[in-house]
């Protein structure tokens, strides 16, 4: 698979974590964490449960706040301020614009239950991006076709299976035309027979767009097929980072070998 930086000059990373530390109370989850993701690169994070993978995605989405260090998106730092004794993401125009470049799909779908599928998809494009209703709806119809659910626009989430809800959640994230897509164990809550449908949709997104992806998954064959790079985590640190072929067939680190022999 060609790497995203093969063509042209090497641009600045789309995502960069620099000396990142994250504590929850006195528990240090991430320490001195440094890594970057290039434009169009698809990077999968693997490692034992509790090693901090989801926390990394939530930090990039500003759903969690850094304890120390920096996260840069397109070279611009995510900035926080103290408000009412709490550390919160700054909400000026620049910072909001930065955050609209990032979409996330969660394990638990998180669709708005009181809205139809169509309303779920067009909500942010209309209210955050300022798209005209008709344009947002046209795009949503196209995305529903892409995820194999063209007939579900007027359904409510409760009328859909878990796999269908997750495909809507993917369409909703893509409707914002994100530069970065964060995928947090998106198949972990699904019945095994529908996992393949959701992964097929994501394989298609990977094949047909240049969206940068940071992926946390237990689906190793999916990780192997779609990733340019796999990063093995343990204890809040990168143990090893390499192309999937190397990680899955000839990992350098004992820790990676042990982890993979337990999950494969
Ligand atoms: P992974 O995704 O690798 O399973 P997580 O990022 O979910 O790991 O969690 C890393 C560690 O941080 C775990 O020990 C978890 O219990 C802890 N943690 C995550 N979120 C919180 C939170 N909101 N409050 C306290 N501890 C948390």
Image (cartoon, rainbow, N blue to C red):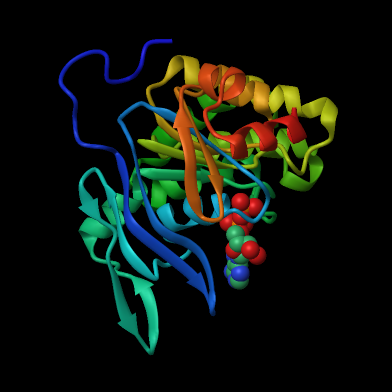
Quarter of the image where one finds residue 177: top left
* Residue drawn at the location 37% of the way across and 23% of the way down: 210
Residue 76 x %, y %: 21, 51
Q: Considering only vertical position in the picture, is 158 above or below 69?
A: above
Horizontal side, residue 76 vs residue 24: left or right: left
Horizontal side, residue 129 vs residue 48: left or right: left
Residue 84 x %, y %: 37, 89
* Residue drawn at the location 80% of the way across and 42% of the way down: 159
Residue 229 x %, y %: 45, 27
Hey, which residue is sitting farthest bottom in the picture?
A: 84
- Tell me the quarter of the image containing the N terminus: top left
The one nearer the camera, 103 or 263, is: 263
* Residue drawn at the location 65% of the way across and 42% of the way down: 185
Hey, which residue is sitting farthest front in the picture?
A: 254
Residue 239 x %, y %: 50, 42
Horizontal side, residue 155 vs residue 67: left or right: right
- Which image quarter has ligand 1? bottom right
Hey, which residue is sitting farthest top in the picture?
A: 1
Q: Is residue 61 visible?
A: yes
Quarter of the image where one finds residue 88: bottom left
The one nearer the camera, 79 or 248, is: 248
Quarter of the image where one finds residue 213: top left
């Amino acid at each position: 698979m060609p790497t995203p930086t093969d063509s042209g000059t090497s641009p600045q990373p789309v995502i960069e974590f620099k000396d990142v530390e994250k504590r929850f109370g006195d528990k240090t989850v991430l320490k001195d964490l440094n890594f970057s993701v290039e434009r169009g690169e698809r990077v999968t994070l693997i490692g034992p449960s509790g090693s901090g993978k989801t926390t990394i995605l939530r930090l990039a989405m500003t759903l969690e706040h850094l304890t120390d260090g920096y996260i840069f998106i397109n070279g611009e730092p995510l900035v926080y301020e103290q408000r009412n004794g709490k550390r919160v993401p700054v909400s000026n125009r620049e910072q909001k614009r930065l955050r609209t470049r990032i979409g996330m799909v969660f394990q638990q779908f998180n669709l708005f239950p009181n809205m139809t599928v169509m309303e779920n998809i067009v909500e942010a494009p209309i209210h955050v991006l300022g798209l005209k209703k008709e344009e947002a709806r046209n795009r949503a119809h196209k995305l529903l076709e892409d995820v194999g659910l063209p007939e579900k626009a007027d359904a409510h989430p409760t009328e859909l299976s878990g796999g269908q809800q997750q495909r809507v959640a993917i369409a909703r994230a893509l409707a914002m035309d994100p530069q970065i897509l964060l995928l947090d164990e998106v198949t972990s809550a699904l019945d095994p027979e529908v996992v393949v449908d959701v992964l097929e949709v994501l394989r298609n997104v990977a094949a047909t767009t240049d969206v940068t992806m940071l992926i946390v998954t237990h689906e190793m064959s999916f990780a192997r097929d779609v990733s340019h790079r796999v990063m093995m985590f343990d204890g809040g640190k990168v143990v090893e980072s390499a192309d999937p072929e190397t990680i899955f067939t000839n990992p350098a680190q004992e820790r990676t070998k042990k982890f993979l022999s337990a999950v494969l």
